Amino acid sequence: MKYLILIAILVATALPVAAQPNMDGMDFPPLMWQDGMRIFFDASVTWAWGGILQNPLWELWQTTTVTDAYLVLTHPTRSELGGYQVRMSLEGNHIVLSEEVVGLPLSVLLDGDELTVAYDPPRPMNGDPVVLYHWSLLNVPFTPVSFFLMPPAAHATPVYFDGAGATVPSNTYNGAGNEYAIPVAMLNGATVDNEIATWSDVKALFR
């Protein structure tokens, strides 16, 4: 209950987000699929993309003690955002200095790790990424922080709602192949995609 009250206070007093997620050069799949929910960071976080075709690797490294992280809806296919529902958690030795639901929501419900947000009036969208949530994290030393996004109890995937209240399935970087056990992002560590490949698929890459 205390956590729910804290969220309510932060939402009620939240100012517009000063910093913005850094997505420069990241407009490629699987990071920027339509209707995706992704984690991005501020410009102080360095990143690299590599690995092999069947198992791409996304590395994210903190360069300052305080880092801003963002939940972003990538390339939405609807013109309005009426709300969203997702389970999410952070694991690590970090301290959350502040967190907020972005966009002046009408209501915010946090039940365990399940977050339900409603906007009225709906937020307009034009296909560009939309910031949904913002964390400010203190992490000294720079130890790994894992971000997990999972489906809410009532749905098979995280979802958002259009301006008429219709449910739109969303997708995450970890996907459903490992039942959402893989983090969608790991600060100061590596995140691997959950594409399942057979040994013959792997060998085919080296023929």
Image (spheres, rainbow, N blue to C red):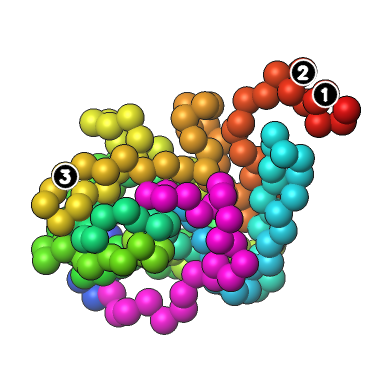
Q: Main secondary structure of the magenta part?
A: loop
- Number of marks drawn: 3
Q: Does the magenta stretch include residue 35?
A: yes
Amino acid under disc 2: Ser
Q: Is residue 193 left or right of residue 179?
A: right
Spatial CA span between label 1 and label 2: 5 Å
Identify the residue at image location x=42%, y=57%. Answer: 74
Mark 1 secondary-structure assignment: helix
Q: What stretch is highlighted in magenta?
A: 14-36
> Which residue reaches farthest right?
207
Residue 200 tag number: 2
Relative to 138, does residue 91 appear above or below in the rendering?
Answer: above
- Of residues 152 and 135, the one drawn nearer to the viewer in this rendering: 152
Q: Is residue 199 left or right of residue 80?
A: right
The residue pinned by badge 3 equals: 166
Identify the residue at image location x=21%, y=49%. Answer: 161
Q: In this view, does 16 lie to the left or right of 81?
A: right
Answer yes or no: is residue 65 visible: no
Mark 3 crowdedness (10 Å alpha carbons): few <14, some 14-19, many ≥20: few
The residue pinned by badge 1 equals: 203
**Circle nearer the N terminus (1, 3):** 3
Identify the residue at image location x=70%, y=19%. Answer: 198
Spatial CA span between label 2 and label 3: 42 Å
Relative to 152, does residue 14 appear above or below in the rendering?
Answer: below
**Circle nearer the N terminus (2, 3):** 3
Q: Where is residue 187 in the image (x, y as percent from the top left)?
A: 62, 55
Where is the C terminus found, in terms of image quarters?
top right
- Of residues 47 and 181, the one drawn nearer to the viewer in this rendering: 47
Answer yes or no: is residue 201 visible: yes
Corner quadrant of residue 150 = top left
Mark 2 crowdedness (10 Å alpha carbons): few <14, some 14-19, many ≥20: few
Amino acid under disc 3: Ala
